[in-house]
Amino acid sequence: MSAIRRVFTTVAAAVLLLTPFAARGADDPVEINAIVPMTGGAAFIGKGYSAAFTALETYVNKHGGIGGRPLKFIVQDDQSNPQTSVQLFSALIDKKVPVVLGAALVAECNAMKAMLKDGPLLYCLTPAVHPEAGSYVFSADPSTNDQLAASIHYFRARGLNRIAIITSTDASGQDADTTIAGAMQVPMNRGVSEVAHEHFNVTDLSVQAQIERIKATNPQVLIAWTTGTPFATILRAVNDSGLQIPVYTNAGNLTYGQMTQYHDFLPKDLYFPAVACVVPDGITDPAVKAATNVYFQALRDTGVQPQYIESVAYDPALLVVTALRALGPNAGAQKIRDYLNGISNFAGASGRYNFKTSPQRGLDISQMFVARWDGSQNNWVAVSKPGGDPR
């Protein structure tokens, strides 16, 4: 038995994947539909998600499929556009599919979840959507509430209490405005003060004026909450202004491509919210460590360098596969929802899932790390324990 198979026998999340495959090649595949941005401004996210689906599909089909039938992810491109997401989702509702993975962006997923009644189950692949308990909407990763609370706690514990903020005016930035305000009010973050709060449009070519105003307030940390090209716009302004303080950004920027592309103007201290697979050096849970190893190998077997983006889609897809293996490939939305919300001890690549204590999500602040980009290692390293306490 291979090392990976020995690992899977100890991980509740993946035991079902080892069922011997029934040779029924004539049977139709079990299809799981996904709506993600393969083109447009968020294409780098969608391509990462698609790579995760391919890796998981390959692994599952090597180790049993679903009820003896092969697994097939059907990926549709929403073009980073909420209207397109709604059109694609409406067509899937008409087809009465039981589950849809996606979308990747807050605006898209909010538009899709507004269409739900009694299904399908919608597993949003973003932490910035906040589903109601018992609903048909699920959300990936620890919430942005927990990400920001843990990270602000980390800085406060280091004596960095003067926080400046710059957020975008889109749905992601609006969510950040709300969650940052809430994170600064939790008891463990007493004493932290917001010294400046600036906004910008994601299409702006410069935010130099906003950064200069921030610099004048003498902050100790800058929260720059945006993703992709707009984040580069902020980093250039920080560099040009000579503002030399730690910069904290969201997990959507946890990509090797961005770190390479922005190398010349990266701040000395750049921090991120992180889940287990981003910082394997910080993992102390043996089952989670085993699950991340399987995740890494599954991606590498399909020629992909594992990073955070893939994990956002991988774990939700694995959870849905596990539900279908347990319930049968024809399970409906209600049974899948109830199965997921009954999980209390599932080791995944992003941490230990408990949907009973964290409904519709499974992960909370206890699975949240703070990571720092280490250019000398060309990787992220854990600077906090789970929950945000400094290591």
Image: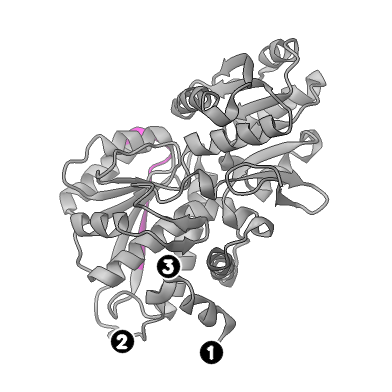
Of labels 3 and 2, the one closer to you: 3
Q: Residue 34: image x %, image y %?
A: 35, 53
- In this rendering, the answer to whether 167 lies above or below 116 is above
Q: Mark 3 or 1 closer to N-term?
A: 1
The kind of residue on which mark 1 rests is Met
The residue wearing badge 1 is 1
x 38%, y 61%: residue = 319
The image quarter in which residue 184 lies: top right
Please say whether residue 107 is visible from this viewpoint.
yes
Q: What is the x, y in percent for residue 361?
A: 39, 48
The residue identified by callout 2 is 22
Q: Alpha-carbon neighbours of circle 1 within 10 Å: few (<14), some, or many (≥20)? A: few
Q: Residues within 10 Å of mark 3 (few under 14, many from 20)?
A: many
Location of mark 3 (residue): 13
Determine whether the residue tagged by mark 1 lies in a helix, strand or loop: loop
> Magenta stretch?
72-83
Query: What's the residue at 72%, 42% (across, down)?
Result: 261
Which residue is nearer to you in this view: 377 or 196?
A: 196
Name the quadrant containing residue 264: top right
Residue 50 visible from this viewpoint: no
